[in-house]
Image (cartoon, grey):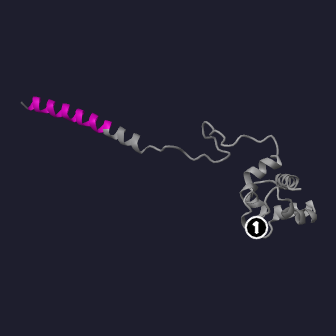
Amino acid sequence: MKRVLAAVLVVAGLTAGAVMASVEDEIRARISPVGEVCLQGEECGEAAAATETASSGPRSGSEVYDAVCMACHTTGAAGAPVIGDADAWAPRIDKGLETLVSHAINGFNAMPAKGGCSSCPDEEIQASVEYMVEQSQ
């Protein structure tokens, strides 16, 4: 009888161990990380897909206008001269392109520096100013 009881306990112990191992595997799977942090310069396996495609050069004035300047210069928000309004642009154009570009890059009145696009290079801001001037003469 002792042998049967010992055999039953051994089988029960093995079954309980297998069940516990299965439960532990399920728990590990549920709490496993969904990603990892990879710092620039570290080897981290496969690289993440780029969110932006590499630019072949600076954007055109119309592209920068559409992306950055349009919000204010289409509606006249905060006193911005509306693109195409020759009367509103004439006194500004009379100050010269260099002054207009300087105001756009450094900010002027209610307009923040670079129209709020801190990642835009100066040449793109200049191209957008030239575009707006061309459209507003």
Please state the horizontal and vertical placement of residue 32, each as a whole percent of the image.
Answer: 44, 43
Q: Quadrant of the C terminus?
A: bottom right
Nearest the camera: 111 or 8? 111
Nearest the camera: 66 or 43? 66
Q: Which residues are magenta?
A: 2-22
Q: Amino acid at mark 1?
A: Gly
Magenta part mainly helix, strand or loop? Answer: helix
Question: Which residue is rendered at x = 89% and y = 66% of the image?
Answer: 91
- Please determine whether, in this image, residue 42 is positioned above or below residue 122: above
Nearest the camera: 133 or 102? 133
**What is the secondary structure assignment of the residue under circle 1?**
helix
- Please determine whether, in this image, residue 100 is positioned above or below residue 38: below
- Looking at the image, residue 12 sits to the left or right of residue 50; the answer is left
Report which quarter residue 122 is drawn in.
bottom right
Would residue 93 be counted in the magenta stretch?
Answer: no
Please state the horizontal and vertical placement of residue 82, each as a whole percent of the image.
Answer: 78, 59
Report which quarter residue 27 is drawn in.
top left
Q: Which residue is mark 1?
A: 79
Question: Which residue is rendered at x = 14% and y = 31% of the image?
Answer: 8
- Extreme residue in the bottom direction: 109
Please state the horizontal and vertical placement of residue 29, each as a whole percent of the image.
Answer: 40, 40
Question: Which residue is rendered at x = 78% and y = 47% of the image?
Answer: 63
Nearest the camera: 12 or 118? 118
Q: Quadrant of the N terminus?
A: top left
